[in-house]
Image (cartoon, rainbow, N blue to C red):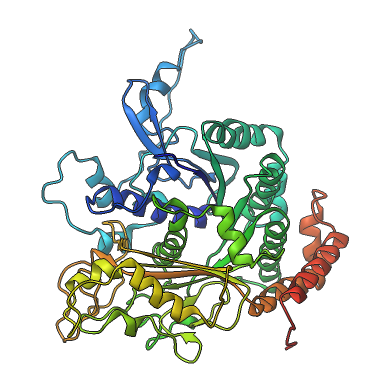
């Protein structure tokens, strides 16, 4: 089977938290014998190591700061022999050897080192809830030696010299050796071995120095691969600025990445981690038991949404191209900023027909959350374009006991119900929706943040006792969309640039990266973009 490949690039620590959950979900598919819908060659590459053994690793490049990798080695154990063979002593004098203390592995990582699967727990979620400090603490996959790029200019979590501004990122990207390592040695390596490259899926931190690297990378990809451009998800972790100046810097970083996403990607989707302020105990978070304060938790939720909505790009039957999906969401227009709404878990009740779940209420879906506009529901007001994916209903329905329902619904039937629910949002050629039988697998590394009413198979059940063990799978719904309500977010970023103070501008002008005139020009451009979405209610 031919595959139209996608190269994934993760830029920054938060992006790598999200990406690690994303890849662990891919690994969970391999543990199931009942998953016929997904073409894994889109995201993975087959190869050989130095021993001639077959490997199957993500087509991935990830960037992070020194000190952020934890137990992860820059070269996968699959390829360690290659590293050993190329190390030849050239000095005959006295040598002193210094070794760092080995990183202490948690129970999940120690379990991966064991050859046997006997007596391993079904989930490590409780342990990981208290032991995760960096993303590699719950990483399960082996990576190709070209995947990991550690940036040595700054240290991870260094309060004295933080990697905090867009300009710091663009300064690093301007270094010739960095571009060689990132683009020529890594991205071009993966691109040249592709037979039919779809494009690039970029996850980039939006609030710190990685915003500058992400913006520069989008521009370079657009220049070097104009026919295979990118879709970018801007990852916004919960921000806790200590001063007005810090708050302004964080906002400017986000605005500058959005500006770059509009100029150099096919679709830019800002994603904001859920916070306690948007929790809705009777709505989208009714069947969740977390407040999303932990990166391990909120990154899992974002990853599940991204993974679900991108499933159509890697279907075995009738896939949609990554850039074709972006064009659908844009509604055939030149607008670039989109939104992602997610419902997880899908509230499919054990004794209620699925058609009762796939319904809107006064043009809203209360059990979904808009991760871009931070709305506690999914707003189905008329938009420009959308691509929605519902997953798991046909398989989960096999465990239902519904009066009059003598068989599980087909994917065609669930798709018809989804189309009917979403018809108030977008209709016509710029609404492409999908239904998959495959639920979201809940891997041993995924948080068990589901309420007791969610049973092991992902159904909602009544009763006081509820589930005793872990959840193994859940249904989900994710919707990429574009509508006039995004004008407020774009205008907010415009105003941020137009009102920047002189003291903050100085942080960006030192390397000649972004001047006050640049901020004004970009701010005015963003204002034009905002008005292109529709009328704006000034607050």
Number of dots carrying numbers: 0
Measuring 15% from the left and 41% from the top, which residue is drawn there?
A: 116
Q: Quadrant of residue 406?
A: bottom left
Query: Does residue 535 appear anywhere in the picture?
Result: yes
> Is 486 or 427 nearer to us in this picture?
427
Measuring 54% from the left and 78% from the top, which residue is drawn there?
A: 374
Q: Is residue 424 above or below residue 93?
A: below
> Is 192 or 127 nearer to us in this picture?
192
Where is residue 51? Give x, y as percent: 32, 20
Where is residue 205? Give x, y as percent: 58, 57
Q: Is residue 152 found left or right of 218 in the rendered image?
A: left
Q: Find the residue positioned furthest to the right.
A: 517
Q: Is residue 128 found left or right of 264 in the rendered image?
A: left
Q: Quadrant of the N terminus?
A: top left
Q: Is residue 532 above or below residue 106?
A: below
Q: Quadrant of residue 438?
A: bottom left
């Amino acid at each position: 089977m031919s595959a139209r490949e996608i190269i994934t690039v993760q830029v920054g620590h938060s992006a790598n938290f999200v990406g690690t959950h994303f890849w662990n979900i891919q690994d969970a598919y391999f543990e199931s014998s009942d998953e016929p819908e997904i073409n894994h060659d889109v995201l993975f590459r087959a190869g050989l190591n130095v021993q001639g053994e077959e490997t199957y690793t993500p087509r991935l490049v990830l960037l992070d700061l020194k000190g952020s990798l934890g137990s992860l080695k820059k070269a996968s154990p699959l390829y360690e022999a290659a590293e050993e063979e190329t190390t030849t002593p050239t000095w005959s004098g006295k040598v002193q050897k210094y070794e760092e203390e080995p990183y202490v592995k948690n129970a999940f990582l120690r379990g991966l080192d064991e050859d046997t699967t006997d007596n391993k727990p079904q989930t490590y979620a409780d342990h990981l809830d208290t032991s995760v400090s960096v993303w590699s603490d719950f990483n399960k996959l082996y990576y190709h030696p070209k995947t990991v790029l550690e940036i040595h200019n700054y240290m991870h979590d260094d309060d004295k010299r933080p990697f905090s501004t867009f300009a710091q990122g663009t300064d690093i990207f301007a270094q010739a050796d960095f571009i060689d390592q990132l683009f020529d040695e890594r991205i071009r390596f993966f691109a040249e071995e592709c037979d039919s490259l779809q494009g690039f899926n970029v996850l980039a931190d939006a609030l710190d120095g990685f915003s500058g690297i992400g913006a520069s990378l989008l521009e370079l990809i657009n220049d070097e691969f104009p026919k295979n451009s990118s879709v970018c998800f801007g990852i916004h972790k919960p921000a806790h600025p200590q001063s007005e100046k810090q708050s302004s810097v964080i906002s400017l970083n986000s605005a500058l990445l959005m500006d770059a996403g509009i100029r150099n990607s096919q679709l830019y989707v800002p994603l904001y981690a859920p916070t306690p302020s948007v929790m809705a105990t009777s709505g989208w978070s009714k069947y969740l038991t977390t407040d999303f304060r932990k990166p391990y938790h909120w990154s899992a939720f974002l990853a599940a949404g991204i993974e679900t909505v991108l499933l159509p790009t890697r279907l075995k039957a009738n896939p949609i191209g990554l850039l074709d999906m972006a064009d659908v969401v844009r509604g055939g227009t030149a607008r670039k900023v989109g939104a992602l709404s997610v419902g997880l878990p899908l509230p499919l009740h054990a004794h209620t027909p699925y058609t009762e779940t796939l319904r809107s209420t006064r043009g809203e879906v209360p059990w979904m959350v808009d991760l871009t506009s931070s709305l506690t529901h999914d707003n189905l007001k008329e938009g420009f374009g959308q691509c929605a994916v519902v997953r798991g209903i046909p398989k989960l329905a096999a465990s239902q006991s519904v009066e009059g329902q003598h068989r599980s619904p087909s994917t065609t039937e669930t798709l018809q119900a989804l189309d009917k629910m979403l018809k108030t949002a977008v209709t016509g050629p710029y609404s492409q929706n999908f239904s998959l039988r495959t639920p979201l697998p809940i891997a041993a590394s995924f948080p068990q943040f589901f309420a007791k009413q969610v049973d092991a198979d992902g159904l909602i059940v009544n009763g006081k006792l509820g589930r005793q063990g872990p959840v193994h799978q859940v249904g989900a719904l994710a919707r990429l969309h574009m509508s006039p309500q995004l004008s407020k977010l774009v205008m907010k970023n415009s105003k941020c640039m137009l009102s920047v103070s002189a003291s903050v501008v100085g942080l960006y002008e030192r390397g000649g990266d972004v001047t006050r005139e640049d901020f004004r020009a970009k701010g005015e451009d963003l204002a034009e973009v905002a008005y292109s979405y529709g009328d704006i209610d000034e607050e």
